Image (cartoon, grey):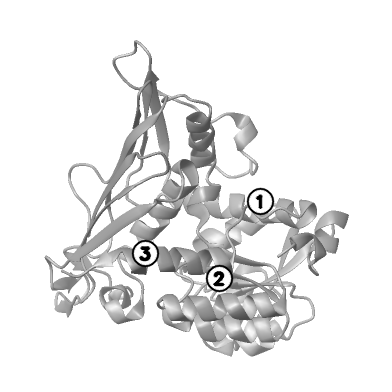
Amino acid sequence: MNTSESPLAGPARSGKPIGVGIIGLGAHGSWAERSHLPALRAVPGYELRALSASSRQSAERSGQKHGVARAFGTAAELVACDEVDLVVVAVKVPYHRELVQTALDAGKSVLCEWPLGNGLAEAEDMARRARSRAVPTVVGLQARSHPALAYARDLVADGYVGEVLSTTVVGSGGAWGVTVGPGDHYVLDAANGATLLTIPFSHTLDGLAFVLGEPEELRIQQVSRRTSAIDTESGQPVPMTAADQVVASGRLPGGAVATFHYRGGMTRGTNFRWEINGTEGDLVLTAPVGHPQLSPLTLQGGRGTSTGLAPMAVPESYVRVPHLDPRADASAYAVAHAYQQFLVDLREGTSRVPDFAHGAARHRSIESAVTAG
């Protein structure tokens, strides 16, 4: 779809702010509060004009806290608001499809968090609806918008590591471990679509594909080593049907080998390390947890006669949102860069930010690669 012909393209090119309405912006530490809110405030070109929550009372509390005048108790009211051009769906995965449909039926552009749908069928349905409405969409696979990954992509393309021979990722999910917070039980139920596979692994896979190319072969296996987690408040066990181990292997364009291991919880050892090994050098990205889409990333490299790794600062030319700190504002950092790139896409007719079609394709790539056992 040509974003230059969209209803948002005119305001984006003229400098008029795009009016945003967030479904799911709470007042007590929601994901939207930690990421989308600071991201939107750091990127000129957007104006947060409305929010909705689970009830009118909670919406009003959130509106008062965040200084948002239009606070609605239902998503239907938010999408009907003429001041809203872009609807952000930032709620739990099982509610994505219904809310996205409501926004699309109102003719609004939509940014939906990842996973796009609770499974491939839902994601494909949303992509079809968006295509029929001919409105710009964004799926929240923001790792590929992180400046560190953009720099790594260019380093690889420019031959820093020579020919890529292999790449290896090991990561910890944070959740799906020994304990679970009282508000996070839903991620332990595989039926809800928010699992170790669909969240940290899939965000990382998408970032890797951005840097090194889409895997031409991929095989994913999920294993359940834990069947429950202990609630941190009650001390009671909570059933866990989502797998706590994900292992994958594949081949990249050109024949390089790719391997992944994601494990639930945290480890005393390595919680995120991504190595890119080539004939001339190596690149390594690390983070305190295996979610590159929301963690501070450290890039190191070495090549030629060097026998070790050295820190590599991301050049300022890759940093398009200077008002956020990549460490202190890690939850919002990549999200903000995705918003900024979306503005560029709208102004220039490009399509670098992943849309619903990309989201459906990512769902398809994962589900088709999962093997039994």
Residue 112 tag number: 2
Q: Secondary structure at mark 2?
A: strand
Q: Quadrant of residue 324?
A: top right
Real-space CA distance between mark 1 and mark 3, rounded to the nearest whole angstrom? 25 Å
The residue carrying mark 3 is 366
* Residue toward you, 194 or 155: 155
User: Looking at the image, can residue 276 be seen?
Assistant: no
User: Looking at the image, can residue 160 be seen?
Assistant: yes
Using the image, determine if residue 206 lies above or below residue 213: below
The image shows residue 8 at horizontal and vertical percentages of 78, 66
The image shows residue 310 at horizontal and vertical percentages of 38, 21
- Nearer-N-terminus badge (1/3): 1
- Nearer-N-terminus badge (3/2): 2
Label 3, residues with CA under 10 Å away: few <14, some 14-19, many ≥20: some
Q: Residue furthest right?
A: 14
Using the image, determine if residue 3 lies above or below residue 50: above
Using the image, determine if residue 334 lies above or below residue 257: below
Real-space CA distance between mark 3 and mark 2, rounded to the nearest whole angstrom? 18 Å
Q: Nearer the viewer, mark 3 or mark 2?
A: 3
Q: Secondary structure at mark 1?
A: helix
The residue carrying mark 1 is 341
Q: Determine the residue positioned at 27% across, 70% down.
A: 181
Q: Quadrant of the N terminus?
A: bottom right
What kind of residue is marked 2? Cys
* Residue toward you, 28 or 218: 218
What kind of residue is marked 1? Gln
